[in-house]
């Protein structure tokens, strides 16, 4: 890839909505409910979608994307935006993956998942993979990265031990992403971890479902970041 000069955007036209590709990390309805500014909210991104956005767009945010079943958005497509001086931000899923690849060219990464990839705590694309409804993009399965986070939080609450964390994560990694759910994981854990511990873990996760959804948390952080950018740098 060629050298792309990093651009710090200091003026954003409030009359031109940012474009956000999102759907499985957070519903589009939720995005509209919490976002202060008006945005052009689009489904999870796939290859070719950036050609269809408003040509005057100054900021593009990528959260969710299609891969495995369709061609994923390529780094080259995002580089084309950066070369035109368009701010590109990523988080949570496909956005975090591409931000790690392209942050040295000016793309911005937001959230814990981006930082986990950046620091090699996680490496595989499968960490953020899930299946979702084609109708409303609602997740059907649970991404491995969310399970990692939830189990670590359970350890902090003394529900599971360090060795049990390792056992649970290794079991989760052996389940293909299209089959990965807490129910399937708990079935796999029977005989490896005490039944009482599994029940406590199940209860902890159900009682803290939203808080333990790392992809959603990162999406919220990205939305707040965009709102803040338009508050600080937006001009009418």
Image (tube, helix red, strand yellow):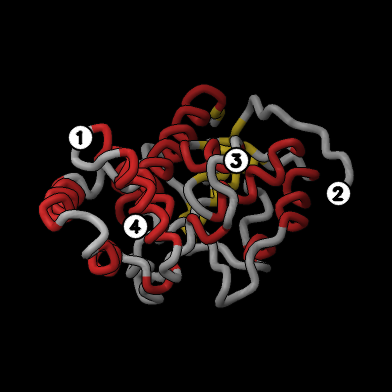
39 in relation to 23, above or below: above
Q: CA distance from mark 4 to mark 1?
A: 32 Å
Mark closer to the chain start, 2 or 1 = 2
The one nearer the camera, 196 or 149, is: 196
User: What residue sits right under mark 2 in the picture?
Assistant: 1
The reply to whether dot 3 and dot 2 touch (C-beta < 8 Å) is no
Mark closer to the chain start, 4 or 2 = 2
Question: Which label lies toward us, 4 or 1?
Answer: 1
Q: Secondary structure at mark 3?
A: loop
Question: Which label lies toward us, 1 or 3?
Answer: 1
Q: CA distance from mark 4 to mark 2?
A: 34 Å
User: What residue sits right under mark 3 in the picture?
Assistant: 120
Q: Position of residue 54 (x, y in %)?
A: 62, 56
**Residue 158 badge:** 1
Q: Residues within 10 Å of mark 3 (few under 14, many from 20)?
A: few
Q: CA distance from mark 2 to mark 1?
A: 47 Å
The residue at the point 71 percent across, 60 percent down is: 74
232 in relation to 177, above or below: above
The reply to whether dot 2 and dot 1 touch (C-beta < 8 Å) is no
Q: CA distance from mark 3 to mark 4?
A: 28 Å
């Amino acid at each position: 890839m060629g050298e792309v000069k990093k651009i710090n955007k200091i003026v954003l036209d409030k009359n031109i909505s940012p474009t956000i590709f999102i759907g499985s990390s957070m519903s589009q309805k939720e995005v509209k409910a919490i976002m202060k500014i008006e945005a052009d909210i689009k489904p999870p991104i796939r290859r070719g979608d950036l050609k269809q956005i408003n040509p005057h767009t100054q900021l593009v945010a990528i959260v969710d994307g299609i891969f495995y079943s369709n061609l994923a958005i390529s780094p080259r497509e995002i580089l084309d935006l950066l070369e035109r001086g368009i701010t590109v931000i990523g988080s949570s899923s496909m956005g975090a993956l591409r931000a790690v690849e392209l942050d040295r060219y000016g793309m911005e990464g937001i959230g814990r998942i981006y930082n986990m990839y950046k620091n090699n705590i996680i490496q595989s694309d499968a960490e953020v993979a899930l299946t979702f409804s084609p109708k409303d993009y609602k997740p059907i399965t649970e991404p491995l990265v969310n399970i990692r986070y939830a189990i670590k939080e359970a350890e902090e609450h003394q529900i599971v031990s360090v060795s049990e964390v390792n056992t649970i994560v290794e079991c989760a990694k052996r389940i293909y992403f299209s089959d990965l759910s807490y129910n399937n994981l708990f079935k796999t854990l029977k005989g490896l971890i005490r039944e009482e511990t599994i029940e406590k873990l199940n209860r902890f996760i159900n009682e803290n479902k939203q808080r333990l959804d790392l992809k959603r948390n990162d999406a919220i952080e990205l939305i707040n970041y965009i709102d803040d950018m338009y508050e600080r740098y937006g001009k009418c």
